[in-house]
Image (cartoon, rainbow, N blue to C red):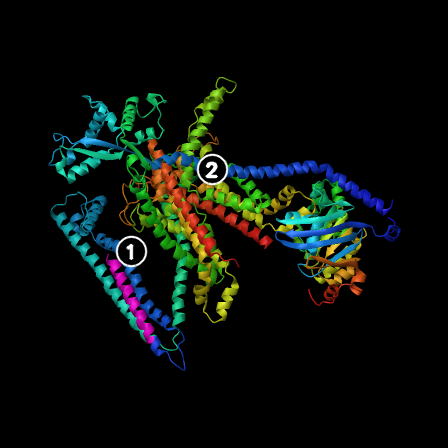
Amino acid sequence: MTDATQNSARALDLRTRVEARLKARNASERRFRLYGRVAIIVALSFLAVLVGRIAVQGWTTFIDTQVTVQVYLKPERIDAADPSLANYDLLVAESVLASVGEQDDDYGEASGKVMDIMSNDLGFQLLRQVKADPSLIGKTVTVTGPLKADAALYFKGAISRSTDEADRKLNDRQLNWLDKLDKAGAVKRGFNWQFFTRSDSTEPEQAGVLGAVVGSAMMLLITAMLAIPIGVLAATYLEEFAPKNAWTDMIEVNINNLAAVPSIVYGLLGLAVFINGLGVPRSSPLVGGLVLALMALPTVIIATRSALKAVPPSIREAALGVGASRTQTVFHHVLPLAMPGVMTGAILSLAHALGETAPLLMIGMVSFVPGVPDGFTGAATVLPVQVFIWENASERAFHERTAGAILVLLAFMVIMNLAAIIVRRRFERRW
Amino acid sequence: MPSQRDDAAAQGPKIKIRARDVNVFYGEKQALFDVSLDVPERSVTALIGPSGCGKSTFLRCINRMNDTIPGAVVKGRIEIDGEDVNDKALDPVVLRARVGMVFQKPNPFPKTIFENVAYGPRIHGIASSKKDLAEIVERSLKRAGLWAEVADRLHQPGTGLSGGQQQRLVIARAIAVSPEVILMDEPCSALDPIATARIEELIDELRHQYSIVIVTHSMAQAARVSQKTAFFHMGKLVEAGATDEIFTNPKDSRTQDYITGRFG
Amino acid sequence: MFTWVALAALILFSGLSYFAGRRRAAGLQGAPVSLHSLPGYHGAYVALWAGVPAALLVLLSAGFGGPLGEVLVRAAPPAAISSMDAFQSDVFFDDALAMSRGQQASETVYEGPQKAALDAAITKSRLISDLITYGTLAAAVVLALSGAVLAYPRLARDFRARNRVEGWIYAVFLACSVTAVLTTVGIVASLVWESLRFFHAVPIQSFLLGTEWDPQIAMRTDQYASAGAFGAVPLFAGTFLIMLIAMAVAAPIGLFSAIYLSEYASALSRSIIKPLLEILAGVPTVVYGFFAALTVGPLFRAGFNALGAQLVGGEFDALGQYLMQVQNQMALVAGAVMGIMLIPFVSSLSDDIINAVPQSLRDGSLAMGATRSETVKKVVLPAALPGIMAAMLLAVSRAVGETMIVTMAAGLQAKTTFNPLDTVTTVTVQIVTLLTGDQEFDSPKTLSAFGLGLTLFVVTLGLNIIALRIVQKYREQYD
């Protein structure tokens, strides 16, 4: 056989062999690619379902149903000397009954049912008005306030008449009253500003996120003031000054491992060291900020180091070459150039700290705080913990609020992440 | 096996690869302009020219490796034995089984020496049995001149070899599939002179069986190993012809300048 | 209050010293020999000596002055209270300290000599606290003045003020990087210390090997506690089960996403999909917990109950009966949602690892005529395997330490089971449960949380160290 024929025979053989298997191989290629697609689609649909579900559960929180009632302040029921003793909720209930053309029965059953749909906020308003101006006793006063959460859920469609009467919170009689009030124009729907101007409450319709938002802000302020300077300086030291020796190696290994310590362990540290050891007040933004600062520190250090690494050595050589000291080189040239990266990392680690919950449970932040925290050492709650507290509440209306609070929390996360992206886009330099 | 010389004399140089009006674009940038070149069968064709002249780009057109670069567009016609390589119906997998490639930096897989060479036969289903596969591996390593050095450590990682050995391993890996064409993209640029000499010897032996296209930076190497040389400049094929001819009597002044070292 | 005023005064004084030092240095400036350092450095040098030592003293006194005074008051119990037991005398001193600070005391009524002793203790406490306050003040003034007075005359034309100031800066740098180490020391010390107290009450082997977990009952007597109500095995089993479920969800989806993103996706779809996955990673865990508890839990339960209703009466009657009783808080729910949380974690780590495999290996394989998937399966993945294993270990460590999802969606029943439809509890859930609510720090119940915390820390640290080692080795291979 000549070499040429041998060669072409060999080539032909190779082709037939390869082609014989080609179909199966291409099929397996398509299968493999499909697995990848499916994985991506599954992951992204989880995201869609998660966010979508919470939005569906929570958006009604931002709708407010206010009811306006004209209450006759019966002089025989209110003692002018001490107006706080009077039962204003009952007065409200009677006025509502009157407006729907009914009367209270002897057992107060009807008025009790009314109190289940009218928030006691209306009664509080009356008390405040009478205290401020006792001459109102004997007159008719108009008050506007929220419906009780269950009644609001009826207007939002979450409670429907088609459900068996025994299975829902409000019976037909109460729903009839609500319909009559609505027909009479006493019920107004609008944007729920109160959700942002009130703090936690035992009554869902009066609960808002103000206290939690302020608490989160105060805590993040402490975290930022500690974690960012300490983290940036530590990273600068390790990256620019530290000699390569066992000590700095140890610090480095340490930082990498700290970044992976479960957050709850930081909570235990805070409880044992800050609260029991140093006597920092429990539940305070101060102790929360300290714990989260320690938690955020490794992330800030790692982000800063990579930003510093991205500054080309030629910059350092140029500065040192004109006679700057190492400190001057770092503070005048390297750090300013690394700043966008540092800030991005810092914002992202603060965003992470904003969403952190577990360590805060350890340091007593689960308490009920019905107001804006009074100072850095006062009792406070923060947004994610507020979510946790409300999720634990059994009333259905609180679940709506929980989803609402999550939406507020997610909005803050989005804002912080956008800020990080903007910083990166605007100031990032490519070398 | 009859002598190669008789065979070549009987048939004359047959064209293995025929490229016509090849244009390549990387996004906005055009990297090759109207390149037309014939590559003769069972000989070594060297592509020379300054960095960025498009010689590697042309090489990667032949086995459609440009497909792996996002945004790369190849226009024109390249035929192997009269068959268009850019034909939609032709699976690049089949094409690449016929056209082997050796890269600038040795890139053995992080597997054993045996597994490196056996990889191609395995994925293409060439070996019919374990024994067959072992024979293919041995034959390929022998042909690549590496067998004597690695016979006793076939099951150690290929990454543990020296640079020159790694490059010969990669060549063995390529010929294990019995391709018809071998493309070499500056195969010696990462090697020391002694390793380079061994690879050049190997190329000289391989040309009796394979059609080889080699991209090289070294004028001396092109002169030593190739029978045909093509000079590229700024994405254009300036001149192509018998190696002796190009190096002794270039027609184009740019070729003259380049081979005498005035630029590049 | 005192602290803030003192610090403000110090900052003012330090600022003045800065300007004084700078002026003096500027005055020294002149031909032919110029200053070694810029005048600003001379100023800073004086300012640092004037401000920093005194400020440190003030801060120390603010942090430790109160506890120190307390120790001094308690150190010498008056004869009048020698009849009291330890608890009563504690209350006595608490009252004395509280009253000396004008705070609310307990309602204990003291009479006769005890009343006199109380008044004496109050006076003593006030005296000590005044001593500490004014002593600090005096010492701070002396420190600040002497710092400034000693530093000022050293300024001279050839004085290396810049180097001195940089020395201070180095000290600050060092202190900052030591904070990270101190955090670790703090974690280890607090966990070990409290755990030792716990293991004093409950032997370590019955904690690690005991199979019964019931901290509520154990509060009654220590004997019962030692008998094994603090056996953590059910918690470890529950943690392990939920981790397995989470990894069964996260590992394949995360890994395949990473492969698709790095090997197949176009630059455009990559730039859309990656940020979306990052959003999934940025969602706070409490949100996942809410989702698990109120959406996934009820959904799974309804699904299994309906399936059970189908099976009842048929061939699989027993299984049907079981499925109809499944509750919201099953391990499967917490595990699945945790898996969703881990997907972006696994995928971004694997993506990095896969991208670190050199392109030349892919080219080598593709040029042989391998298909993309063959290249991925036979070349890229084997090369990336150690790195991917490390990524999985890090994900496991995350899953083990994750708290909120399990707290909200898993149960409290300590059971050793591998049935994913059963209710289990985890180490982290128990830590949360033990430490929210009552905070009696010396009961074994509370201390056991630290025992659990120590175990958790050791396990996650171990996983992390192994993973980082592997990644390091892997990186070296391709550098």
Whether residue A386 sits left or right of residue A428 in the image: it is: left
Question: Quarter-wise, where is residue C437 in the image?
Answer: top left
Q: Residue furthest top?
A: C313
Observer-nearest of A7 and B54:
B54
Residue under pointer 1:
C63
Q: Look at the image and tell me in which quarter the N terminus of chain C lies.
A: bottom left
Element class at badge 2: helix
Q: Chain of mark 2?
A: A
Q: Chain of mark 1?
A: C
Q: Is residue C23 magenta?
A: yes
**Image point (41%, 61%), residue name:** C174
Residue under pointer 2:
A48
Where residue C303 appears, as percent x and y from the top left, is 46, 26
Callout 1 and callout 2 share a chain: no
Query: Over which residues does the magenta segment extend?
Result: C1-24
Vertical position of residue C212 compared to residue B23: above or below = above
Type of amino acid at the residue the image marks with label 1: Gly
Q: Is residue C65 magenta?
A: no
Magenta stretch, overall SS: helix
Which label was assigned to residue C347? none
**Image point (57%, 39%), residue name:** A36
Observer-nearest of A156 and C353:
A156
Type of amino acid at the residue the image marks with label 2: Ala
Whether residue C223 sits left or right of residue A337 in the image: it is: left
Question: Quarter-wise, where is residue B129 in the image?
Answer: top right
